[in-house]
Image: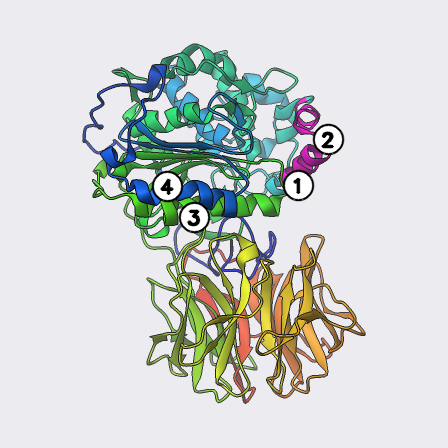
Amino acid sequence: MTKPLPGRWPRRLLSTVLIVGALLAACTGAQPTPTSAPASPPPTRDYWPTDGWRSDAAANHGLDEAALAGLRAQIEQELPFLDSLLIVKDGYLVYEEYFNGYDVDRLHQLASVTKSFTSALVGMAQAEGAITDLDATLGGELRQYFGDLLRRDQRNISLRHLLQMRSGLAFDEEALYEDSTSLVIEEGYDAATAAFTQRDLTRYALEHDMAYRPGEAWSYSTADSQLLSAAFGALTGQSLEDFASQRLFPALGIDDWNWVADVNGVSLGGTGLELTPRDMAKLGFLYLNRGVWEGQELLRADWVRLSTTSQGSGVNAWSGQTLPIEWYGMQWWTWRPELFAGQRAIAAQGYGGQHVILLPDHDMIVVTTAEPAVAPDAAENQINESYDLVKYSILPAVTDQPVTDPFWAAPDASPPPADALYTVDANGRGRRALLADPQSQFWGPAWSPDGTQVVFSKSVPAVVSPGSIPVELYIADSDGANLRQLTSNGRSNYLPAWSPDGRQIAYVSGGRGGFDSHEIYVINADGSGDTNLTANDAQEYGVAWSPDGSKLAFGSKRDGEMGIYTMNRDGSEQQPLPIPAAGQAPWWSPDGRQIVYTLESEGNADIYVMDADGGNQRLHIGGPEWEYLAAWSPDGQRIAFTSHRDGEAAIYVANADGSDVKRVSGRNVTAAVGRWLPDGTQLVFNGAEQRAGGLLGLFD
């Protein structure tokens, strides 16, 4: 799920959740409070799938069967990692396909879809009176259970905080993925599971320091879900699995499952559940029916709405910014219509592409399962590609009109803050807004060679996005006037670079096939002649013209690791440098003798310089914070770059030898992608101003 409008911010230059640019809000960290669900009846059902789903023709439920007929071939060709795809519409199973040896009866690992089952069980225990207060804290009402393990600053962590991923614990989810996935790949699933569960996971979670006060910040954390499982056991006297096996699963007709527990018998709250895809769909059906199953209220309607509704504002720990946490509820992901092909969507989401996706306006559920034993980068691609399959292949096959129900309406909230385009004098003075629109996100600008125009990316503002969203290139005059669209290809287009003669623009463009689909394109400045130059099914990142315009330098993973390559302007003679260089986002010096570039290594990124043939590679600007996306000044005397050295992302300028580093974008703005005016007097960049109450930062 979801990444930065690809310019990788500090949790890897490209990631699971598409995060578009630098975002900032003026909100405080207020916590959401339970609200009554809007009064409207759930759909009327003519049967319940307790004893099994009934199948029916897709055409009988407003789906184009001809459009669906191509899904299997598409999956086999483009999404070979998918193990199953199920579509439930109006309570009927209208599409079901299995791949890679899976079938209707074979259990599948759910990964973090487990979290949504955990949330449902908390809601069920609340409906039964076993859990009465979501604001009960580990050091208060639960002190008898947690007391000896708690540090002082952990005592105020509440059930609500754990449900919302707001414990404040400094838990490294990415390290968990990397460690566990390596074990799965090397030793198998059972061995990896045993290595993780043969310990006290409650103690393991609480051994982590606190990065924020409880409730202050959102940070996706399986440790929070594990503590939620432990708290659930303390309050109900039963593990999640025991409670589910006696109450939830029998009610839904689920009679085959596996659920892993730790050495103390505490069920894993954030992963470890295995079900068939058909039984996964039953969780979605329970929620579409607002907690009612065969006339029995298993969950309160208020719980269904609260757990699937976005949170109030808080610090996004991925970026350090304070903003509405609009993408997450209580162990469920929530998606705005403008990010999901016009449909309100709610998702249980798991590593590698495990999904239960609810589309309430169509009374529809989509289930996907996928290969889980993959590295984190591949898992992110699989999640994004699974979402794109739903948005761009399945939803277009729906022929009936959506029926909007106020129960599922996203709460009113200010739109996500969006980056504007700014210019600033090279000495850091005279910052001014060039182009701003609260309904649009601007990113990655570049001047034309004559300084009269600027090209940039423009998209719907989003902090986290399910799969890809269209990001088109636009051009405006140097004063921000005469805005016009350059590309209209529906892809994600970014990091444009104007040719020295002003006739063409090279850029990176990603389709709907994961990051391996990100290629180098070139388009004429009038919008004609859009051409894929690399066409190699390997991820490319960053592109720059040689000073004479005859060649392009770019980063590419065509040999497995990101390295610097060159090609002719027509795409011919693509090759690594004579002396190979690892790195990405290259930029030629004005005399063509050197290249500055970004090298990512061991969780950090620094700026390097080398000769144009790859020789004399050396660290130029670096340190413990991220430094990236460097560009030479037109006179070759300075280098502009983006850095997090002061906490938030900002634009800096250094002398060509790396000395005299100065921040030029200002102290009250997050900023990225600084590019020089041809005369070297100014820079253009995208950024977001800090407002009262906001915290600064820039992501993942």
Q: Which residue is mark 3?
A: 388
Q: Which residue is mark 2?
A: 187
Asked if 202 appears above or below 566 in the picture, the reply is: above
Magenta range:
175-197
Which of marks 1 and 2 precedes in the sequence? 1
Asked if 35 appears above or below 148 in the picture, the reply is: below
Amino acid on which disc 4 is placed: Ala
Asked if 415 appears above or below 314 in the picture, the reply is: below
Q: Residue at x 19, y 28 (%)?
A: 41
Mark 2 or mark 1, whichever is nearer to me: 2
Q: CA–CA distance between discs 4 and 1?
A: 37 Å
Amino acid on which disc 2 is placed: Glu
The answer to which of 44 and 29 lies nearer the viewer is 44
Q: Which residue is mark 4?
A: 69
| Labelled pair 2, 1 in contact (Cβ < 8 Å) | no
Q: CA–CA distance between discs 2 and 4?
A: 38 Å
Amino acid on which disc 3 is placed: Asp
| 568 left or right of 616 in image | left
Q: Residue at x 44, y 76 (%)?
A: 529
| Labelled pair 3, 4 in contact (Cβ < 8 Å) | no
Q: CA–CA distance between discs 3 and 4?
A: 17 Å
Reply yes or no: does residue 182 show up in magenta: yes
